[in-house]
């Protein structure tokens, strides 16, 4: 059975909600899913066939717990397939989306050894306490990406790629 580790960082819980939705979708396909906060992920992560790491972008930076996980597990993650997503804009403009993608790309360049199988940016959500409470999470896009992750994990397992 394919095992996928979903690691996440969150500030107000919206990234965790996305991870929970991805986990539910993957489980429906028969995949074993383990969900962990990025700051709590410890060895051995080699037991996973695929690692998915998601974290929000705030003020132009990807959450520090995501960076720390990549740094802490660099040697192992060089050998395992990794997928990455960022929780980005809360304004639905082409400029905001492009800026979020650029911020995530810049964050990933800090880990030049990492070549993710796929990278996505999803819309972000304000804290429920925020006066506007904007929410740009597109659950259909998230579901499509999750199903793509499942296909990627099947392909890497079938080809013995790790």
Image (cartoon, rainbow, N blue to C red):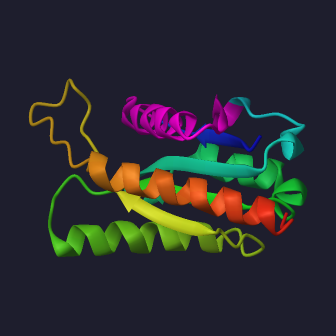
- Which image quarter is the N terminus in? top right
Residue beneath the point at 40% across and 61% down: 121
Q: Is residue 35 magenta?
A: yes
Left or right: residue 146 versus residue 130 is: right
Q: What is the x, y in percent for residue 147? A: 48, 53
Foreground: 64 or 74? 74
Foreground: 115 or 3? 3
Residue beneath the point at 86% across and 65% down: 160
Vertically, is 119 above or below 52? below
Residue beneath the point at 15% across and 35% down: 133
Q: Does the magenta stretch include residue 53?
A: no
Vertically, is 107 above or below 129? below
Vertically, is 129 above or below 140? above
Q: What is the x, y in percent for residue 2? A: 74, 44
- Magenta region, residue range: 11-39
Left or right: residue 42 versus residue 87 is: right
Report the residue that reaches farthest toward the left.
132
Instruction: Give the quarter of the image for residue 161.
Output: bottom right
- Which image quarter is the C terminus in? bottom right
Q: What is the x, y in percent for residue 124? A: 30, 48
- Residue 82 in view here: no
């Amino acid at each position: 059975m394919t095992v996928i580790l979903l690691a996440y960082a969150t500030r107000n819980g919206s990234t965790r909600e996305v991870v929970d939705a991805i986990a539910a979708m993957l489980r429906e396909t028969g995949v074993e899913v383990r969900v962990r906060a990025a700051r709590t992920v410890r060895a051995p992560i080699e037991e996973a066939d695929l690692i998915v790491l998601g974290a929000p972008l705030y003020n132009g930076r990807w959450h520090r717990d995501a960076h720390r996980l990549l740094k802490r597990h660099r040697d192992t993650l060089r050998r395992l397939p990794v997928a990455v997503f960022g929780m980005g804009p809360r304004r639905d403009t082409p400029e905001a989306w492009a800026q979020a993608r650029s911020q995530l790309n810049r964050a990933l360049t800090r880990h030049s050894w990492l070549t993710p199988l796929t990278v996505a940016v999803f819309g972000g959500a304000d804290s429920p306490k925020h006066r506007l409470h904007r929410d740009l999470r597109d659950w259909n896009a998230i579901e499509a990406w999750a199903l793509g992750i499942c296909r990627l994990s099947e392909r890497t397992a079938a080809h013995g790629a790790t």
